[in-house]
Structures are given as C-alpha cells and as structure tokens.
Amino acid sequence: MSKLVIVESPAKAKTISKFLGKKFVVKSSFGHVRDLPKSKMGVDTANNFEPHYIVSRDKSKVAKELKADAKGKEEILFATDEDREGEAISWHLAQILGVDPTKAKRIVFHEITKTAIEEAILHPRPLDLKMVDAQQARRILDRLVGYELSPFLWRKVAKGLSAGRVQSVAVRLVVEREREIKAFNPEEYWTIEGNFANLEKINFTAKLSATPEKKLEKLDIKNEDTTNKILADLKNVSYILDSVEKKTSHRNPPPPFTTSSLQQDANNRLGFSAKQTMRLAQQLYEGIELGSQGSHGLITYMRTDSVNMAQKFLDDSRDVITADFGPKYALDKPRLYTNKSKNAQEAHEAVRPTEAARTPDLVKPFLDKNQFRLYELIWNRAMSTQMAPAEISSTGANIISTNKYVFRASGQTVVFDGFLKLYPDKNRDNALPNLVNGEAVKCEELKPEQHFTEPPARYNDAGLVKALEEHGIGRPSTYAPTIATIEDRGYVERDDKKRLQPRDIAYTVNDLLVQHFPKIVDLEFTAKLEESFDEIARGEKEWQPVIGEFYFPFKETLKAKEIELPDKVKIEDEQTDEVCEKCGKPMVIKNGRFGKFMACSGYPECKTTKNIANLTGVKCPKCGLGELAGRKSKRGKMFYGCNRYPNCDFALWDKPTGEKCEKCGSLMTQSFKGDVKCSNKECVSNASTKDKEEKE
C-alpha cells in the first residue's frame, strides 16, 4: 500500500515527489481548503467564539479529490509549511479527511531537498494544536474586527471601505508620517568645506567643525551673513595639522536574512516590493527546474524570524569560500548569530540557500531575471556571514587656523575586503594623503554651501516593514500581505519613488478610528495582542479568553458609536457651481474609497461622475487664463500643468508655491523634500541649489 503526502502547492508537490519513491503519492491542497464563510461572520460569539468553517466553493473539487486519494492509503502525512498557518492548514485537512487531529502525522522541513524530505518522512510528529489555536485566534479576531467594523465604516464614511486589526495600524503609520512631512518647516543652514594641500601638494577636503568659541553642530551656521563673517575671518590665515589619528578596525557581516530583513534589503537594493519579494522567494523555495537535475528547492523557508543556520550549511560554506576566494577569506570556526526577537519561534532557520555550492552563476540559466537577482542576494548574504571580517583603515585629522578655527578631515580605506567581496555596503573609499602632526597645510579654496533641513521620507516597503517589526506588530507571514492590503483597498498609493502615500480617504478613516476606536489603531495594544498569540502558541494561554477580552469591550463601543455618530458624519458633499452635462442638476464633490470625485446630485437617478483636477490656485504664467493643476505622467510621476491643456502646454515638475522669484519674476516651486527654488533653471538664485544637485 502507498502513503499519501499532502502539501499546499503544486510546485512543492512536484519537487517533493521527485525525492520519494513509488510508495508515496504527493498531492497539493492548493493552499487553504477550509475557512470561515465569506457570506456571514461564521463565529458564534455567544458560544465561546465557536467558528463555523466551510469548504469554499472553489475548493470543493480539490477536497473531493483529496478524499478519493486518501482512500485505502496506508498512511497520510501532512507536509504543509512549518508555521502557524501551515499547521492550521494541516489541521483543517485532517478534519476534512476524517483523521483524528490528535493522531494525525505531521512532517516538517525547512528546505525542499532530498536529505531534508527523507529525514522528515522518518520522523513524523503530532499536529501542534497550540499553534493551531494561535492561528485560529488570529483568524477569528481579524474576522470579528473586519466583519463588524467595515460595515460601520460603510454607513458612516463611504461604501466599499474595510478595516482590519493590523492593516488599520499600518494606515495610521503612513498617515502620521505624511502629516509629519506636511507640517515640516525647512530650516536654513550652511556648511563650509575647505580644499587643502599637504607639503607633497596632494589635495584633500575637510569641513569646518569648530569656531574659536565652540564646536559646531549641524544647524549652527544659520544664514549667509554668518557664513560671510566666518569667511572674512579666514582670509590671510595659515593652517597646521593637529590630532592626526590612524587606526585599523574590523567590521563583521550582518546576520543572515529573516523575513523582515530580506524584504527590507530586497526593497533597498533591488527595488522589489514586499509582495514581489515573497512571491519570488516562494518560487525559489518550492522548486525550480534545473534542466537534467530536475526540480530543486533553492532556498530554505522564507517566513522566519530566526538567524540560525544548519551546521551542514556552515561546514559546506567554509569549503566553498576556501575554494572560490582563498583560505584567508574563510573562518576557522563558524560565526553564529543570536536572535534579537524574543518571539522568534516560527521557524528554526534563517533564509539561506539550500546548497552552499549552488552558486548564482550555476542556476542563472534556469531562473528569470528577478528570480536570479533575489537568489543572488540571498546566496551572497548567507555566504558572507561565514567570511572573514573586513579590515578598515581610518584616518582623522584636525586642521587648525592661526585664529583657532578647526576643520575636520576624515577618510577610510579597505585594507582587506573580507565579507565585503560578496556583500558590499554603500561606504566608499575616501583615502587621505599622508598627514603628519604639526605639518603646515595650504588652503586652496573655501566653499560655502547653503542647505535646508529635510522632512522624513515617506515609507517605502522596507521602511514600513521595519516600523511594523520594531513596534511588534504582525509576524513574518503578515508584513507583505498587510502592505498589499492597504494598497489594494485604496488607502495608499505609490508616488513616483514607489513610496507609500495616503489617499484622502485614509485620513478620514484613520481619524475616525483614532478618535472613536483608539484600541484598534493603538500600536502598543496591537503589539500586546501579537504577544498573546505567541503565548497561545506556547501553551501559556487559552485562545477564547484572549478573544473575549478584546471583543466584548469592542462590541460595546461599536454599539455606542452606532447611535452617537450620524451616518456620513465625517464627510459631507461639497457644493460646486458646475452642473451635470446629462441632466442639468448641480454637481457635488464626494469622498470615495479612492479619494475625492465629482458626482451628480441627482444620484441614483443620474450616475454621472468625473475626476477632479488637483488645482493649486496658481494662475498659469504662460497663458494667463488657466490654473496649474497636479497631474500624473504616463509613468506615474507627479507634475503640475495648465488645466487648459492641450490649448496651453505649460508644465512644472515641482509644486508652485504661488510666490514669484525676486530675481527674475518666475514662479517659485517647492520640491517633495521641502526645498524652495525658482522654476527658472537659469536664475542666479538657484546657483547654490544647482551645486548641491550636481554633488548628489
């Protein structure tokens, strides 16, 4: 008789079946087969939160086929992913197939390789019902919040809105960051850089760091007048070197990837969204066809908060490093890392290649461009952790004028690249010439430069994942879906730098939740719930009381707010002078899921709608008739053009302030970073800004 092995995906099934003999039949459940119903809540709040699970209509065929496959089998092995969601999928499958969950056989592995699969088959374990309870608690609580709060938002704000326990906190972070940016007032400050030459006439640069009175902080030179006074003081002075320091330091590599750090680095280095990163990682994990070698899983499981790596990989990586880079790049003994997260428990290994010897070049012919880029990133990071430290030579020196002004020069060079050979950082060599204490140096030029402080940047995927992790919100499996959800639901959109920008509706919903349901969007409270789920998984808490402590007070608040707040309390239609082109009734401005739009006041009899131009209130300087309005280019980049286009083609990339330049009379503009400058690129007022842009 044969044995049945059930996994979640067809790709995973295909790879695993290659490693098992004819006695095994490997089938896929295609993800979740059983879940709470979509048409109703599916949770009996009056009966200890008893869930009502159903086999969804689109999975009925899969369930039927799995039941047929299970008949007459000697043994059924549940081989879903080893995290809470995977444990829950196995539990649901056991229920569907009539297997007692307490007697079900579960096999787990962190990589899809022949050795790992054969080892797992030999050592099945029982289902971890505490992990199942933790996943049920999360699923049920999220259903209660979403199912009851979303309709409330439909009645009070706009149809089609959704709220969620984690997604609403993510929206709050994005909204608060945007408000911080908008409230930001740029401060002017100046720096002075000197170009010096030593006795060997080798040039180097240094920045003014102290006046005779004090050490300079970033914003201490506040304006051009102060700058000019300093420059006047530094005329006809001489300089000597002082406090020349040379030292060598060692830099160790960062730890191997967790889910969070993988998403952050893939976003920062490769420009991948969190969702894109996890999709590609899933493909690499489940198996890639490597020609005559067949299908192989190329990386370990990608939903993890562990930084551990298997001893075999550590040993193999040393052999590969020695062979490919030489003995001086290898370590005498493995470098081990410690988990910083107290809740690191969802997997036992970091994200790493399944085989150290499977270099990116070896698999490149079998991967598409993005699969290769991500595999290369993972391979380089994991291998670099077992390479020798980089050796950095640093030099620092003060250059002191005869009237006690101090310039600071610093530089560094990589003496031995070590792990940087595989995993370079952004720091560049900045070598200083030979500098000797007491030696006279000549100042060739002093260069003043105007700057303005900049607001914090909008969150990109990496930044939001980092913020969620730092606040203890969500776990490895939730970061990417959370960002995808708030984007899909219309709360945020991408700006021209792929950063997350809140839509109008995000402010409205966030403010309502903050004011009337503060716990839903409270970062600390949400983090405590995550800790409660961890405690359930460890068997320290029962799941029903955790749900009850949250739900019953939430339900009471919801009832009170339903009475307290009138329908559409937060948004009223704005009246306009425009009339509907179809029926002649007045047009009004409404707020919808995707922001403001214009609609006929005769709705629902007349359903005419139109987009609203993002008007700035600034008259077009070219035609004098139109008004500049914000629009997006075909590539999604924001620009400001005359609303009489195509009759007038005037356009600017930066937002016009409404003021005019004192030097040339052109419109003044403000960049996203807050820099205010003349829209005329040739204007002399832009000289310092242009210098800055060229340097960057």
Image (cartoon, grey):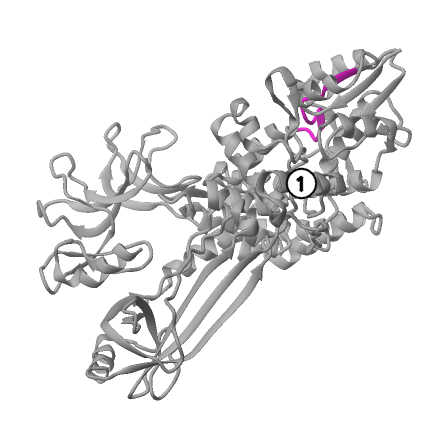
| Residue positioned 46% across, 53% down in the render | 175
Q: Is residue 135 left or right of residue 207?
A: right
In the rendered view, does 621 fall on the left or right side of 387? left
Q: Where is residue 279 shown, x and y percent of the image?
A: 56, 32
Residue that numbered label 1 is attached to:
317
Residue at the image point whose x is 56% and y is 27% from the top: 363
Residue kind at label 1, given as amino acid type: Ser
On screen, 669 above or below 433?
above
Residue 673 in the image: above or below residue 133:
below
Name the quadrant containing residue 126: top right
Q: Examine the image and state in which quarter residue 613 appears.
A: top left
Q: Nearer the viewer, residue 204 or 198?
A: 198
| Quadrant of the image containing the N terminus | top right
- How far across and how far down the image is residue 437, in percent? 40, 80
- For the question of whether residue 524 can be seen, the reply is yes
Please tell me which residue is depicted at 53% across the width and 66% down the height of the picture.
248
Residue 193 visible here: no
- Horizontal side of 84 relative to 512 (left or right) equals right
For the C terminus, the image quarter is bottom left
Q: Which residues are magenta?
A: 25-37
